[in-house]
Amino acid sequence: MIKVVRGNPTPEELAAALAVVQARAAATAAAGTGAPRPRAGWSDPARIARGALPRPGTRTWARTYWPG
């Protein structure tokens, strides 16, 4: 379902926008890539905290940087 939130498009503008959305959906369906691609290693959030995190204690404030 498509909903116009702002503005007052003409029927021609609305038809053009709908044609683009339908063409994009048809191209995606034709490609057959329904499964998500695996995440690249550099964008994996788990890589940021691979090492042990600093434990609270003396001078903890000095170790509040991203490990790595």
Image (spheres, helix red, strand yellow):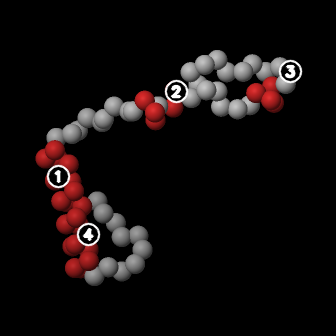
Tell me the amino acid under the disc marked 4.
Ala
- Tell me the residue at 74%/31% (across/down): 64
Label whose residue precedes the other's in the sequence (3 or 1): 1
- Tell me the residue at 83%/20% (across/down): 57
Q: Residue furthest right?
A: 58
Which numbered disc covers residue 58?
Answer: 3
Q: Look at mark 4 in the image and give the residue it sits on.
A: 17
From mark 3 to mark 1, how far is it between C-alphas? 58 Å
Label whose residue precedes the other's in the sequence (4 or 2): 4
Above or below 35: residue 9: below
From mark 2 to mark 3, how far is it between C-alphas? 26 Å
Q: Look at mark 2 in the image and give the residue it sits on.
A: 47
Q: Look at mark 1 in the image and give the residue it sits on.
A: 27
From mark 4 to mark 2, how far is it between C-alphas? 40 Å
SS at mark 2 in the image = helix
Label whose residue precedes the other's in the sequence (3 or 4): 4
